Image (cartoon, helix red, strand yellow):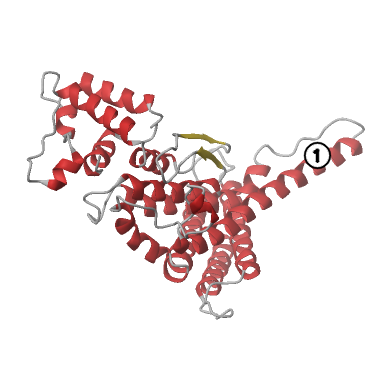
Amino acid sequence: LCTSYMDALHETASSLRTILIAKRRVGSTTIPSDVDLQKNVVGWMEVIAGTHAAAVALFQEKEENDLHRVARSFTRLCNAMVDECASSIVETILMERAKLAGYLMRCPFVLSSYDGHFGSSGGEEEEEGGIIISPDFIESIQLVGIVVRLCDDVSEQMKVGMDDTVEKETDMYQGQQQHPHPHVLNLIQVGPQAIKSSLAKRLEEKMLEVALDVQGMTPEFGWRGAQQFHFDCMELASLFGVSTTATISSNGGGGGVKRSCLKEKDYFGCLLDAASLMAMKPEKFASLKEVLYKLVHPDGDMTTMAKEDDDNLQRQGLILHYDDFHADGTIMNEAQSMLLAKGLVYLDLDDAISIMNRRGL
């Protein structure tokens, strides 16, 4: 019976994936319509929740037995479904059809800019000195927003439905509240929560590849371009319930970034820390880099380490080396504390050093 149920779940998941990535032209695009996308994601939620519920039910026995081994198979299948759903959305719908791949390829060019913001379109927002979202990132943001809002709405509807059930049962049993099983709400919410979390993780990884220069495409970047990238990152994070407020302007009059997570999970922590450091105002950035340099070179000359004829290093100024910090645990802890003081909670020191060495002053 368990094997037949598992086969049925796997067949349903395969069918959902086929429908999701099928190239059906809607007008001038092959991107699924909002209704079709929502319907498909709801299908994923249902099959993921059903698979997870089966695993939990089979784990009820305290002693190890054959049912536990079957339950672990259901758990692996559930995790695979979550990954498959998120992967299909990110790799096929967003990367291939919604211009996300093109946006990520263009980011190194934007980041290398010292002169302007490539998201600006010359309209009213640019005249006010602000930054707008990059044009080739808009479609991806819209699609991600549809999925995330659906996940939140379904989770909330389930919670409200559960509260109504408890209230009705309280009346039925003459005021003695009959609490549902403590894991029931988690069981039925696992689908939307898991999809949202996996989607956030995959998107953060894509953006971090740009911020940390994983592909070696951005050996040097400028503050102006970093501001645009930072703004795009905040727009993406805000879809997942991360409250971001910032005053960034093209004339340099902007302030820092204040961020607080409104949900249980802190999505995009590392990405927003990296983007914040990249877009830090020049005077604050130079001050932080100088203080870190003094930690390992207390008696060193604070003039630029660049040769007069090396324009690249002249832009970068002081060069930090992670090994200098790693060699002394005390210095390492002090450096990490300095990052924490700047609000960079999730960013590792080696990644922070990489960013600071690549940014032009």
Given the image, on which type of amino acid does mark 1 rest? Val
Residue sitting at 39 percent across and 46 percent down? Answer: 227
Residue sitting at 67 percent across and 43 percent down? Answer: 185
User: Where residue 297 sits in the image (x, y, percent)?
Assistant: 13, 23
Residue 244 lies left or right of residue 112; in this view the side is: right
Residue 81 lies left or right of residue 287; in this view the side is: right
User: Where residue 183 sits in the image (x, y, percent)?
Assistant: 64, 40
Q: Quarter of the image holding residue 294?
A: top left
User: Where residue 330 sits in the image (x, y, percent)?
Assistant: 22, 18
User: Where residue 278 sits in the image (x, y, percent)?
Assistant: 33, 42
Image height of 309 relative to 138, above or below? above
Q: Secondary structure at mark 1?
A: helix
Residue 145 lies left or right of residue 316; in this view the side is: right
Residue sitting at 62 percent across and 67 percent down? Answer: 34
Split into 4 quadrants, where in the image is the N terminus?
bottom right
Q: Is residue 216 visible?
A: yes
Q: Quarter of the image holding residue 256?
A: top left
Residue under pointer 1: 166
